[in-house]
Image: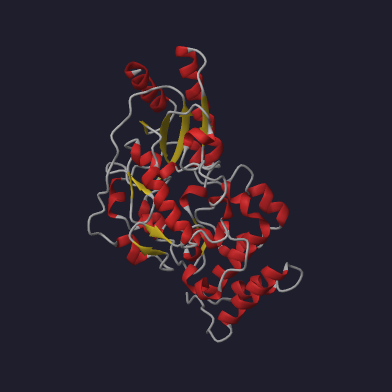
Amino acid sequence: MAILKQEIVDWSLELGFQQAGVSDIDLAVAERRLRLWLDDRFHGSMHYMERHGSKRSHPEELVPGTIRVISVRMDYLADEQDVASSLLDHASKAYISRYALGRDYHKVMRGRLRALARRIEERIGEFGYRVFVDSAPVLEKALAEKAGLGWVGKHTNVINRNEGSWFFLGELYTDLPLPIDSSEHSHCGSCTACIDVCPTDAIVAPYSLDARRCISYLTIESRDPIPVEFRKAIGNRIYGCDDCQLFCPWNKFATRTSEPDFAPRHHLDTAELTDLFAWSEETFLEKTEGSAIRRIGHEQWLRNIAVALGNAATTPTVVAALQSRQDGSSAMVTEHVAWALAQHEHKKPETCNV
């Protein structure tokens, strides 16, 4: 098993993962934390976090026979951090979370994990396993921490001391009695950078995130109107938010990905808000094919961009774009457009003096 484990680590690197580790399935500590989080109702409308009973914290219940979990991570940051930082609250451009600029990571990582399972099968014959990539009741962050891939930081993302936090996680549940790795422990120390920089104060305490206040939740998970109290703070973030990662000191060690699938598509890393707001539903579906962005649908896409346009610099182009969707859109989009237009009513238009 020790030899097989080393081979699994080597194969993982060959398949494009940056690290692999093995953990047992004792998630008692994470289970208690999850229960407290749910009791506080911090999950908002993500009711799936409450479902499945104890399967989320008991891998052997989700996949009978599981005794080990192989966790892997894959870097996704396609450009330097300062490029992303320069776009935050830009006067006219959109900010999209860096993880969503390229191909849907679910597809990329699931295929690689299946390839890893096939290599194991070729080596030892049939064995019990199941692949997961953010697709089932799995406590992936706790498992990654136990497997030594990093620690769960104060912003609740996993941080690796050598690579920062710009990476995806995936798991292979298995019945193989592989040797386990040592669990990582926190190295956040007294740092509060992520807490201090959060636009909506969603990190309510170290290691505790109120998703109901989180921009990623508000722009992606929530299907409801964005609460007015958070609209100004959202700025130009139309899909997710990276602030807590962009300002985390550990990300000075982050490595840019060489994975072609994660390269930005359709210039979404530098797109103008007005251009994206003009997309028809047909264009939206075409441009987001194979992307994680597609999951929010065209209505939420317009809802989010309307808020960002309300926060943009007041120009004839911005106002005209908003006015073009005053009528004929859904009630939710219309309401957000009305709010956005109201933000420009008493502003002096910005002009460019040449």
Residue 276, horizontal then vertical, whole percent: 61, 60
Which residue corresponds to the image point at 57% horizontal and 49% vertical from the top-left?
51
Q: Is residue 206 left or right of residue 64?
A: left
Which residue corresponds to the image point at 56% horizontal and 76% vertical from the top-left?
315
| Residue 88 image-quadrant placement | bottom left
Q: Is residue 201 left or right of residue 277?
A: left
Which residue is the extreme one toward the bottom? 346
Residue 111, horizontal then vertical, whole percent: 54, 30
Which residue corresponds to the image point at 59% horizontal and 84% vertical from the top-left?
345
Please tell me whether residue 145 is drawn above or below residue 113 in the rendered image: below
Residue 196, horizontal then vertical, whole percent: 33, 66
Which residue corresponds to the image point at 35% horizontal and 17% vertical from the top-left?
1
Please tell me whether residue 272 is drawn above or below residue 315 in the rendered image: above
Residue 312 can be seen, yes or no: no
Which residue is the extreme one toward the right? 328
Name the colour scheme.
secondary structure
Q: Is residue 267 left or right of residue 31?
A: right
The residue lying toward the viewer, choosing from 2 and 312, is 2
Residue 106, horizontal then vertical, whole percent: 54, 39
Residue 116 can be seen, yes or no: yes
Total marks drawn? 0
The residue lying toward the viewer, choosing from 182 and 202, is 182
Please tell me whether residue 69 is drawn above or below residue 307 in the rendered image: above
